């Protein structure tokens, strides 16, 4: 099991706690709800048209294509999410729905393997002619991921056969051969999907095809320059702005780009594939590229909530330290892609930093994308929202002041669903010589280490509390390493095994505490990861955060909302001496830790727009809630970075 | 002379000082330079095409229309500027250039009076069909202003005849009559122009036509809704965004709008016409509307530099207190329009506040629009520029990091020229019973008060120094009121007449010191308007300015530039206790007062993007220059609002 599949831990169960609640929500509400949305049966939501398009392409009904050119991918992501759910929670009704739509998809697929309802229904003679803009390979990637997940979850080959045929066609069509198209996708995604397909089928040629796509990217002469010339489209859409092909990471070969650049989702999907390829091929120059971009992403392009992508136009990365809060794009999908990348870097090298980023992004940015009832979603996740400005100013027109039921471009909701439906992939890694724990959450799992069966239970109220009890239960006494991530935010962890303290410093390997011993049934590891309230400060070159602090407790970033703190949150100041105390509020937002304490508020000195008078200061109180839970109590201002006085 | 004309003081001369230098620059450099630009003879500048279009329309050369649909207005504004210049500084070469182009314009005019080269050359059968977008009436307004100025300056009727014919045609075509178009301009301008024309011709029907345009504006049923329906253009361009007809101040009747709204230049041109109409007609409801919008503009929508319009999209006003510095639009033309409005409010009621706004906007926002060499211009005048971000971020794509020689949309450069070429209109008002001084600057003038000749000389180094000496020299002893504005920024003014101190409080009428007496030759008024360095604070609801101060001395707002203070100006902090000292730097920027003193700088605590460490603070120095003089030493960061510690 050295090559991970997409369902790392089919026998894992999350019954209670912060992440489990979300995973259950996905299972009970989000997946059924999104199935209704994809079938255009949710009143008040934007039309999806996705299932409709496949039914039309399959000849099951008359009609025309509806939606955007990447609409198909919404269905693929949902199929993947539903398959993940089936892997851990069998559900006959859901499985039947999947069987039905997979049959439709198979009928829609063309005899040679091609599958893309947008092209099939609107421009059937234009296959592969507009790689820079259309999303044929992106959609193929999502169907491949779905097919792999469906096969792994159910053992059925129905969708796997469809996607193998599709992948085989793509392998025939794309490459450096004389009769092949030597292009590559405008939106990366298929690369990481092909590697999953290789892992599940054992067919290395899919890895080779993924490597081709990555290695050809940005090669000279530019495939895209030739393509847009052929299309008469040399003047690119405004979202390319001044980046031109670097907008889609094809301005240079992938190994030559030091900073993340361009469309943020494409960037992190590409990086995920690059990390996968390193694992498959041992390509050292690609490993080095992954590490360089990782470093610069974390050091210059990363919001404190774990979000990435600070420019609306083109959903892009901006320059170093350019991280505005009210105009953050911070797309949910980009956060998800960063979680993918971080998780794959952990497959290359167990290092606390990768787990830290994965945790920060998942628990703050990604979870904020979904309401507590699982029925509304954010696409964009700014760190400061003032609804009046966001609604009025065009340069914030993309900021939604409340989550919405669906989007015309609905990439994010099913992406959140498939991520949470495969939570076990992110919480643990099974290794040849042991098991690594990346994320702490109450759960129990069964797996095998070196051929020996192992049960493991993790009891914790994390992220509300830092105490974690791990009960290790191997079928027979087994020597293996249990590797526990020591979170970067934690300054004073303590760990004991069977009540004997562990020397953390001596056993800390790159941020993971390595406990290697012969484990026997009943061994208990107890961890204490104390969670004082921390004030986080941004590097002062982030001009938007100067003079402000973000509040963090454990892995959670907190924010203040108008409903708790009044409006004009910019006037709220936290004195340096003010002590904030955490309290678990069982009746708030499904139960959450909140931070409370004294603060102060600036008061206008007078009614004049400009005057020589200093504003007054009055005592106030502050109440902060986890960022991911904001906007579950109606529209209002929100702010992560709070002025410090 | 109770009705002001556009050249209030033909016999005024500005020989030395801050404003005189700019006025001379306009005369010696800007007007000749812009003539070259309008003739497409400036290499490196964007093509204008303006003179070309008239030559083609006049049949003097073959060719096609070039440029935007309001290109004609650039020529009209230049003609007006050149005429103003001729009024005070006769120049045979310039007058001949004017005669030549006026002959071309007359030839281009159609027999019925119509004049608009865009429509004539591109859509001759579409006259007046697209009032919401095309600028036929706007252009007519600018030609009318030019014709009035040309007549007043030279006594020639050549252009006046053209514009009377044009105005008469417009009076025939537009109105509530059965056979008339009951529409009104998409871009206000003709209203104030028609009032000037009425004043110079004595024809009250032009006032009536202006009143029609103002009163019909926003009336139900909407003329524009019907027009766009007819054009099949119900989906308006994105710059209308959610304002729809309020974008051009036609969502409601003009008396029903309390805050400035929509396109800022249109708003202030409209307000200028409204104030003029009050003076002509005594319309009390219109007076009240002017005062209401004035109040709200000053209290909620006004940058400390005197700029207005904080949204790029549609060049619009935003909401109350929404005054971002780096994304300010703050168009030069909008500032000029506000100067027009303020000046007209002074015609209605002598009140210090109107003069204060006029001074602040003219000396800071408007003057910043032009380089010290008169050859490059800003259209947009933000209060904070970080060139790297401005060049990278699409939501700042309109911010130029250096002034440019010309614009495809070149409304601003000739607007600055015509304003500075008629400086005497803004510095003084001649009244039936006296003379009011609004702006202090070294000058001498000749006029008549109640039939009696008066010479007046004002000696001052203002705005570098607050001492002003006014020598009053009536031909015979005359009883009249000299009204001197006591600037709002000045907290301790002193004034004496012939060395006898005046009780300012007792003689202060709405911010103007009223000196009523029998003036005899040799009377001398001395004023001292002390100019300590002031720290100005914005109302804390302006979120972008919280914790910051702007530096003001006299009427000038200062800024810090990278060239003097290093980069990362956001890290510069001014301790509350730090004393800033003014110094006249004769060799800097043509001679300017600068402010210098101790400051401090934030230092990164470490290289991490986020950490728990507080940034360090090191001592630094600060050097501030007048905002209007920024960007005359190459590209670099600039900031008006400086953090206070």
Image (spheres, coloured by chain):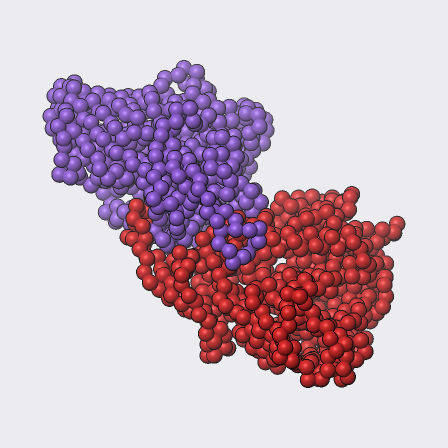
Chain colours: A red, B purple
Q: Is residue B157 visible?
A: no
Query: How many numbered badges does the structure rendering display?
Result: 0
Which residue is located at x 87 percent, y 51 percent?
A177
Position of B522 with respect to A298 (left or right) is left
Position of A256 with respect to B123 (left or right) is right
Which residue is located at x 50 percent, y 27 percent?
B38
Residue B359 in picture, x, y percent from top left? 32, 36
Position of B352 with respect to B507 (left or right) is right
| A40 in relation to B205, above or below | below
Residue A339 in picture, x, y percent from top left? 65, 64
Which quarter of the figure is the N terminus of chain B placed in?
Answer: top left
Point out the residue furthest to the top here. Answer: B92
Residue B491, picture quadrant:
top left
Q: Is residue A335 visible?
A: yes
Point out the residue furthest to the right here. Answer: A178
Residue A511 in picture, x, y percent from top left? 65, 64
Which is more toward the observer, A392 or B581? B581
Which residue is located at x 81 percent, y 78 percent?
A451
Residue A572, picture quadrant:
bottom left
Which is more toward the observer, B350 or A148? A148
Which is more toward the observer, B187 or B447? B447
| B440 in relation to A353, above or below | above
Residue B241 in picture, x, y percent from top left? 48, 53
Which residue is located at x 20 percent, y 27 percent?
B526
């Amino acid at each position: 099991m050295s090559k991970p599949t997409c369902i790392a831990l089919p026998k894992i169960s999350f019954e209670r706690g912060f992440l489990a609640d979300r995973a259950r929500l996905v299972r009970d509400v989000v997946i059924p709800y999104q199935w209704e949305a994809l079938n255009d049966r949710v009143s008040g939501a934007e039309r999806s048209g996705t299932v409709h398009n496949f039914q039309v392409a399959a000849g099951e009904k008359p009609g025309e294509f509806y939606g955007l050119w990447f609409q198909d991918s919404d269905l693929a992501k949902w199929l993947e999410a539903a398959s993940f759910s089936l892997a851990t929670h069998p559900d006959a009704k859901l499985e039947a729905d999947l069987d039905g739509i997979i049959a439709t998809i198979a009928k829609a697929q063309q005899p040679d393997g091609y599958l893309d309802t947008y092209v099939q229904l609107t421009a059937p003679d234009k296959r592969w002619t507009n790689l820079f803009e259309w999303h044929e390979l992106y959609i193929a990637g999502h169907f491949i991921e779905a097919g792999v997940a469906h096969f792994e979850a159910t053992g059925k080959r129905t969708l796997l056969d469809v996607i193998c045929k599709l992948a085989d066609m793509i392998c025939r069509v794309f490459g450096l051969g004389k009769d092949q198209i030597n292009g590559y996708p405008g939106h990366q995604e298929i690369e990481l999907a092909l590697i999953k397909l290789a892992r599940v089928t054992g067919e290395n040629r899919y890895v080779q095809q993924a490597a081709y796509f990555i290695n050809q990217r940005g090669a000279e002469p530019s495939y895209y320059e030739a393509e847009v010339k052929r299309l008469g489209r040399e003047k690119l859409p405004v979202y390319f702005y001044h980046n031109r092909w670097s907008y889609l990471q094809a301005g240079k070969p992938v190994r030559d780009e030091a900073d993340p650049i361009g469309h943020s989702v494409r960037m992190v999907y590409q990086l995920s594939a690059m990390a996968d390829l390193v694992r498959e091929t041992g390509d050292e120059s690609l490993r080095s590229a992954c590490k360089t971009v990782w470093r610069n992403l974390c050091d210059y392009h990363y919001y404190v909530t774990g979000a990435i992508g600070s420019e609306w136009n083109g959903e892009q990365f901006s320059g170093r330290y350019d991280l505005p809060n009210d105009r953050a794009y911070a797309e949910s999908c980009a956060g998800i892609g960063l979680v993918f990348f971080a998780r794959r870097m952990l497959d290359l090298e167990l290092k606390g930093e990768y787990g830290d980023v994965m945790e920060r992004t998942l628990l703050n940015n990604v979870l904020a994308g979904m309401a507590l009832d699982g029925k509304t979603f954010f696409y964009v996740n700014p760190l400061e929202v003032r609804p009046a400005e966001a609604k009025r100013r065009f340069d914030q027109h993309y900021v939604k002041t409340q989550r919405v039921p669906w989007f015309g471009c609905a990439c994010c909701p099913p992406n959140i669903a498939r991520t949470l439906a495969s939570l076990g992939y992110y919480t643990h890694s099974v290794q040849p010589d042991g098991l690594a724990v990346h994320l702490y959450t109450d759960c129990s799992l069964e797996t095998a280490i070196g051929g020996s069966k192992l049960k493991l239970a993790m009891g914790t109220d994390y992220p509300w509390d830092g105490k974690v009890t791990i009960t290790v239960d191997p079928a027979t006494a087994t020597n293996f390493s249990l590797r526990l991530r020591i979170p970067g935010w934690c300054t004073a962890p303590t760990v004991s095994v069977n009540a004997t303290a562990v020397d953390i410093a001596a056993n800390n390997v790159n941020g993971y505490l390595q406990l290697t011993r012969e484990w026997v049934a009943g061994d208990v590891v107890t961890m204490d990861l104390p969670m004082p309230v921390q004030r986080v400060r941004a590097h002062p070159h982030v001009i938007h955060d100067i003079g402000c602090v973000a509040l963090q407790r454990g892995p959670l970033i907190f924010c203040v909302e108008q409903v708790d703190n009044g409006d004009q949150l910019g006037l709220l100041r936290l004195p340096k001496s003010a002590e904030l105390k955490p309290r678990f509020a069982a009746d708030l937002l499904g139960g959450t830790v909140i931070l409370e304490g004294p603060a102060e508020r600036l008061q206008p000195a007078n009614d004049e727009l400009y005057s020589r008078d200093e504003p007054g200061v009055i005592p106030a109180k502050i109440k902060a809630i986890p960022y991911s839970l904001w906007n579950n109590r109606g529209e209002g201002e929100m702010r992560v970075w709070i002025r410090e006085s």
